[in-house]
Amino acid sequence: MPERALPYRPHNHDACVSHALADARAICRTQNARLTPIRERVLELIWQSHKPLGAYDILAMLGTEGHNAAPPTVYRALDFLLQYGLVHRIASLNAFIGCTHAGEQHRGTFLICRQCSNVLELATPEVSKAIEQAAAAESFRLDDITLEVAGICPRCQGDASNA
Amino acid sequence: MPERALPYRPHNHDACVSHALADARAICRTQNARLTPIRERVLELIWQSHKPLGAYDILAMLGTEGHNAAPPTVYRALDFLLQYGLVHRIASLNAFIGCTHAGEQHRGTFLICRQCSNVLELATPEVSKAIEQAAAAESFRLDDITLEVAGICPRCQGDASNA
DNA sequence: GCAAAATTTGAAACATTATAACATTTGCAG
DNA sequence: CTGCAAATGTTATAATGTTTCAAATTTTGC
């Protein structure tokens, strides 16, 4: 079983980010999509945080590094990243997170910790299948699934300080 | 099999609304919760629309009937209704809809039609179970599930006019 | 009943999230 | 290098949600 970097477990975060960026560049190259500096920087910020990041958080971060962007700049970059499956939007938080399964065909399930805000993205074929069956039973043509689970991650369960 | 009123099928809508209100009153009575006039009116408006309704839609409706409420009035009523399981919030739409399983222990799955905006709420134990298992496999303590499926309802699939 | 306490509602201001509209710049094909 | 399309900049505004404090109402203990 391949070792997967759980967000709430220590890992080499820089490597994790640069790996995600390399993946993104490769994906965009094969799709003839332009991962421009702004788009790449937004993706990098999202990955560096490793937690769901609001559009205005990103905006503020860009501001501190001299790039005084307006909201549409960030939203457009996010739209692009969403379109190519490089980030996901967490509807229940109005926030965005890097996709850990970029390039793979998948429907994400998100486990969102209420304490530390870390998010674990799962690819859960059984869950997807059950949902697809439920939709089919109602003759409903399924386009998209939003599945977000709120709760407490393993680390915070055993940790009163909840960093 | 009991006949269920599908939102995208013709049904006696007045009866459907008054039934939901009667249920709500009963539920509040047993729980010693106060279904005040504002709360009841908000619930009624949500049921009458039978589609997801934004908080500001509700606000506007209250306005047209002389009750010039401010946003907190509506949000407080919605909080109450959510707390007692009388309405659900649809995170992907920032909107609210009447719960068709009020009083029952359930986790809702919502099938949201992109054409007509109607929403069908399903109680899907198999789906819930699969999600619970996925969370348990990650030692994640599950508190709440947001499961929203966007697509096209049966009626709109066979109907180009898409009323 | 009645006064104190708690809950609910009113009202104003404000915070956050997202988009519209239009101008400007950049990248690219011919 | 020219013209078109895509991307970005800029300003303003829309849509959604919250904080705060005051007033009214309901409940409760006596």
Image (cartoon, coloured by chain):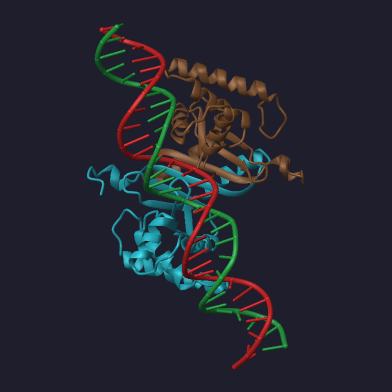
Chain colours: A brown, B cyan, C red, D green
- Image: B85 above or below A35: below
- Nearer-the-camera pick, B108 or D28: D28
Q: Position of residue B101 (x, y in %)?
A: 47, 60
For the point 46% across and 15% down, the residue is: A29
Quadrant where the image shows the C terminus of chain A: top right
**Residue located 73% across and 45% down the image:** A157
Residue A126 visible here: no
The image shows residue B72 at horizontal and vertical percentages of 49, 61
- Name the spot of residue B121 as percent of width and height, x first: 44, 53
Q: Quadrant of residue D29?
A: bottom right
Of residue D13 and residue A48, the one placed in the foreground of this image is: D13
How many circles with numbers are drawn on the protein? 0
Q: Position of residue B63 (x, y in %)?
A: 36, 64
Could you tell whether C19 is left or right of A15 in the image? Answer: left
Quarter of the picture containing the N terminus of chain A is: top right
Q: Name the one closer to the observer, B42 or C17.
A: C17
Q: Is residue B150 above or below residue B58?
A: above
Q: Is residue B38 visible?
A: yes
At 58% from the left and 44% from the top, the residue drawn is A149
In the image, residue C30 above or below residue D23: above
Question: Image height check: is A46 above or below B42?
Answer: above
